[in-house]
Image (cartoon, coloured by chain):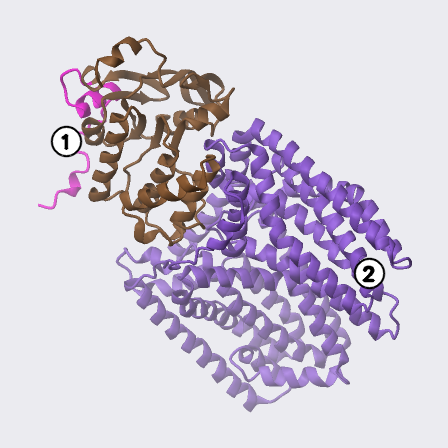
Amino acid sequence: MTDFTAPFAAAPPVLSLQGLRKQFGQKVAVDDLWLDVPAGSMLGLLGPNGAGKTTTLAMTTGLLRPDAGSAQVLGADVWRDPAAAKGRMGVLPDGVRMLDRLTGAELLRYTGLLRGMTEAEVVARTGELLDALGLADAGSTLVVDYSAGMRKKIGLACALIHAPRLLILDEPLEAVDPVSGETIRQILRAFVDGGGTVVLSSHVMELVESLCDRVAIVADGRLLANGTLDEVRAGETLQQRFLSLVGAHELGSETLAWLRSS
Amino acid sequence: MVALLVGLRWRQLGHQLGRNPWMIVSLIISGMIALGLLAALAAGLVALRIAAPDAAVRTLVVVGSGIVLVWWIGSIVVSVDDSLAPERFALLPVTARSLLPGLVVAGATTIGGIGTTVALLLMLVGWSVSPLALVAAVVLIPLALATCVLGARVVSGVLAGWLAGRRTRDLVITLGVLLVACSGLLINVLVRAFARLSDPSAVLPAIADATGWTPLGAVFGVSAALAQGDLLAAGLRLLIALATAAALWFAARGLLAARLVAPIQSRSGGRVRSGGLLDRVLPASPVGAIAARTLRYATRDPRQVINTVMMVLLPALLIGMTLMNGRGEGSFALGPAAILIPAINALLIGTILQLGIAYDNDAIALHIHSGVPGRADRAGRLLGFGIIAVPVTIVLCVAASMLAGRMDLIPASLGAALGLGTAAAGLGVWVGAFLPGRAPAPEANPFGRGSSGGVQSMVAMMIITPLSLAIGGPAFGLAIAAIWTPWLGWLSLAFGLVCGSLAMWGGAVLGGRILERRWPEVLAEVASEA
């Protein structure tokens, strides 16, 4: 990032969530959520279990229709101009199946062609992505037989294949071994250095602290904090800040006392 | 431990029912089927008891052996999804010796176990021909039940290691569903074969006496021998029955002990050959990619392999039966009509295409977030499925015409089958966009919930069937007329191709438009648990 960015500071954000809301029965999963993600940033979306992270990302990627509000990718509304918005996004959803009766290589080719890429591009990038993510040996194994970590990696490869401007990753490093994890971090850093924008959700504070430059914290469907890593941390560790925002659950000294072996 | 395991089984069932109203419906339906079977058994036994007390005893041995056999064979299919699988206890400090009694009792108190118990109690009506036999039968009910449950455990335990591989599991599931689908026909064939025997009444006693000495029927043979006053045979059969149960007990315990320390883990299926030809032949576009994927799933996904096989099997069996019956009556009255049979596949084609997204389940999310045009999704599925269905239809039509001895009717046969099939295909992709239906999850037991697509599929069927008859009607009518005026067959073929192409084009365009409007709702419908 050089001085060139300065004149574009007022440019519209890459991703803009405007008043998203989703209610399931009585439970409000996401409540009036506003969030702007500037270009070239890597945003970590943090929150306890059930905070509404996955629901928010599903509404951002066109998988779940919001009750109110809108999501815009580079100015294109996900719900009014889906073709334009989705073309600029690469998505790694969490908790949905993949077309797992395809091999890794077939799934990549399939995703690339669905995205409207040319055959030559798809073939070249498939090989490169499988190599980079250490899946070259598993290229002709069905995805249904992959381990959890391998599925994450092939899912990430699918999200990357069309060189999107914005990556939406739900739990990208869950179940991934440390070696592959480092590879994924390198890929994401290079992607951001090249002008791309990443939104990733995670439970792991250390991951977000070491990888992201922006942090958003949600709990109970509401946005509690949003800003650069240092703004959100406000001098504490991210873990302390997160607990003080979300509310820690303190155990009394006598709880589970019978667990002491001596 | 026994009470704990039985309670666990029932609590699991209760939670499943509470979470999923469709489970209640299927439970009620299977309960009604069981009640119906039991009522038939009761009526038959009472009738036999009154009319032919001697035959009643022998029938009981055969019926009882049949029940045991169903338990043993059925365990192959049911074990694919066992809520009390030994692996689940592998982390707990329990021994096989302490677990097995509870698992056996839990197995006997399932819906099937209760039904079997009621059936065994009903059989007492038949045994009442002799007081001695009645007493023996009452005493032996627990032994008969134990033989069923233990045998099922041993069979599934022996097969479990083998079933852990994905390919064998897929194969067993496929064969099982096909067997169930064809069971009506098989029973029909068996009954006919039995009826053709010169003297059916002479065979039953022979079968009954023979099975009475086997591990399957010995427990019922004891009472039968007593009813006939043969105490020696009764004693020997009792020994066989006891030895069977004991052997099964020790075998089941051995298997359980082995699995507690060496849990079976589902193995993967290894590499597959990636059909590069498919990718080269089909265009490198969203439509071509979806078509290639549809074709790959037709051979790799057991649920869809079944569909493909049924498309060949159903008309083939019908053609065979029609021609055989026609010949048997010494006339060829039905002969030429056999050329219309391949058109029956239109029913399957409409439903298969309507359920396309339901088979994908929530994996369809990829189509949504990658922004595939709805039209491409619809057209790709049509193209991929057509690459299988069109050759199959042509082979069936040519075969039917040749077997009927009317080669001149090939165009008419093709006109009828392709006309109705393409109309149903176009309607299927259109209806599937707003009534996607439900299919068992990719990894679930295909005998489970909604294996036929549920209520949505029934509604879809009611829309697809009359409309495909309307669109394919001219082609079908002309094909019928061609039986007397063969050149009309060419007209039928032309009508079929033109109307069918229009239906498929319309189905893809309209269905695609609906999909783009309601993708998230479609995703929620096919992914929902209920």
Q: Position of residue A134 (x, y in %)?
A: 27, 47
Residue kind at label 2, given as amino acid type: Leu
Residue kind at label 1, given as amino acid type: Ser
* Magenta span: A233-262
Q: Which chain is purple?
A: B
Taking depth in this image into account, of A48 and B436 the one nearest to the observer is B436
In the shown orientation, is residue A180 left or right of residue B232? left
- Residue B412: image quadrant is bottom right
Query: Does residue B426 lie above or below B228 as drawn?
Result: above
Q: Which residue is mark 2?
A: B409
Return the chain for callout 2. Answer: B
Q: Residue at x 60, y 46 (%)?
A: B383
- Cα distance between the residues tagged 1 and 2: 89 Å
Return the chain for callout 1. Answer: A
Colour used to depict chain A in the structure image? brown
- In this orientation, does residue B454 appear? no
Q: Position of residue A50 (x, y in %)?
A: 36, 29
Q: Residue at x 21, y 38 (%)?
A: A182
Specify whether residue A241 is painted magenta: yes
